[in-house]
Amino acid sequence: MPTVKICGIRMPETLLAMKGLPVDHIGFVFAKSKRQVSPEEAGRLIRLLREEGFQEQGGFLAAGVFVNPTLEELEAVLAEAPLDIVQLHGQETPLFCQEVKERFGVGIFKAASLPESGEGGVGDLAEVTVARLTETLEPYVPYTDAFLLDTFDPVIGGGSGRTFPWQAIPPVRDWARKAGHRLIIAGGLHGDNVEQLLADYGPDGVDVSSGVETDGVKDPDKIRIFVERVKRS
């Protein structure tokens, strides 16, 4: 069954509304973003997860989203917010991933970006692009736990709320699985297109943020619908 990550959590009300849902990962954004939280804010939300027994359901692992952090920055964040996963969206090297994993004992998701497509995830994508992508990710295999594909944004890297050409997913997914990794998809997902993505392209997990918001605020009904549609696929 595919995993589901709800990213960009900022308010305790959002977490409490998700209690009982089969959510696998909760994402806190520490990179520059309108959804950015401080380490102290994330720490309070992670404590709420544990106090309310969310993780007794077997999910709700806390992931932190970073872009080109230093080890010192990660150490400062982790001192306040005990993350289970560090998700890296920048140009972090395989050596950096190794250092993070060994020093902090966290899981690591490494993100890669692809060019934007039209709605529905269709568009042109040369085979050479996929080949270069897997070649780029290959050195990260020993030091990471999953790969995440997102839509490239020239300003913020990812988190654009737009899709990339989904035909890239099967070859990258098959390559990742042979390497013992899951492939998670982000970028432009919402309750009305996630079932098509899962049925036609079969990724191992999905990551959503803006697609479960109304006027920039997490919407409990949209979250519930999204999670239910992922888990019945």
Image: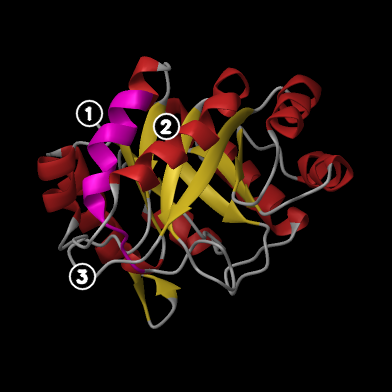
- Residue bearing the label numbered 1: 1
Q: Give the residue type at disc 2.
A: Gly
The image position of residue 192, as x and y in percent, is: 15, 63
Q: Which mark is residue 59?
A: 2
Q: Give the residue type at disc 1.
A: Met
Q: Residue at x 21, y 48 (%)?
A: 167
Are discs 3 and 2 less than 8 Å apart at CB? no
Residue 174 part of the magenta segment:
yes
Please name which of the two marks, 1 or 3, marks the residue nearer to the observer. Answer: 3
Please name which of the two marks, 3 or 2, marks the residue nearer to the observer. Answer: 3
105 vs 117, left or right, is right
For label 2, the SS is: loop
- Residue bearing the label numbered 3: 119
Q: Give the residue type at disc 3.
A: Glu
Structural distance between the alpha carbons of marks 1 and 3: 25 Å
Structural distance between the alpha carbons of marks 3 and 2: 30 Å
For label 3, the SS is: loop
Q: Which mark is residue 66?
A: none
